[in-house]
Amino acid sequence: MIKLLLVEDNEINLDMIQRRLRKKFDIIVARTGLEAVEKAKSDSPQIILMDVGLPDIDGLEATRRIKADPATAKIPVIALTAQAMAGDRENTLAAGCDEYEPKPIEDLPRLLGKIEALVARSGPHDVDPTAG
Ligand code: MN
């Protein structure tokens, strides 16, 4: 199962996204930007879904830090933003996000397609031999 780091501070959104993804992914949760940076390193997820509005550092800054660290730079990041504001896509991509998806997730197959493509593209991983 693909290990996915879900970064989201809103409990309702978190619950909603988890319900939709939990059958397909091994989900790790982070509720702040700093926690996201930390778990990207400690848990070696294969993909990160990154909320942008977070209580400490925002998702863009968290992504910059993840991409600046050689240990986590190759983990693909998909930004999730609540409002499709003009410039959102450009801002997230400029911060180093690999993809962008508006929230709430209305097109789950499209998001799953993006996840699969990015995970495949990021190549072989150090697989945890104890993982099922
Ligand atoms: Mn948020």
Image: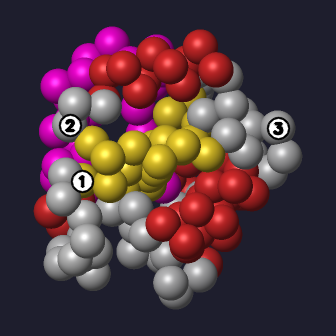
Q: Earlier in the sequence, mark 3 or mark 2?
A: 2
Q: Is mark 1 within 8 Å of ligand 1?
A: no
Residue 92 counted in the magenta span: no
Q: Is residue 6 left or right of residue 47?
A: right
- Secondary structure found at label 3: loop
Instruction: Give me the residue at 68% from left, 40% from top.
Output: 31
Q: Which residues are magenta?
A: 97-118
| Total numbered labels | 3
Indicate which disc residue 2 carries. Answer: 1
Residue 104 counted in the magenta span: yes
Instruction: Give me the residue at 59% from left, 14% from top.
Output: 12
- Secondary structure found at label 1: strand
- Tell me whether the residue at label 1 lies in contact with that at label 3, contact meaning CB atoms closer than 8 angstroms: no
Crowding at dot 2, Cα within 10 Å, few <14 / some 14-19 / many 20+, comes out as few
Disc 3 residue type?
Pro
Structure colour scheme: secondary structure
Q: Earlier in the sequence, mark 2 or mark 1?
A: 1
Residue 124 at least partly seen: yes
The Cα atoms of the two marked residues, 1 and 3, are separated by 27 Å
Crowding at dot 3, Cα within 10 Å, few <14 / some 14-19 / many 20+, comes out as some
Q: Quadrant of residue 120?
A: bottom left
Q: Which residue is mark 3?
A: 55
- Residue 63 location, x and y as percent? 60, 59
Instruction: Give me the residue at 52% from left, 86% from top.
Output: 70
Q: Which residue is mark 2?
A: 24
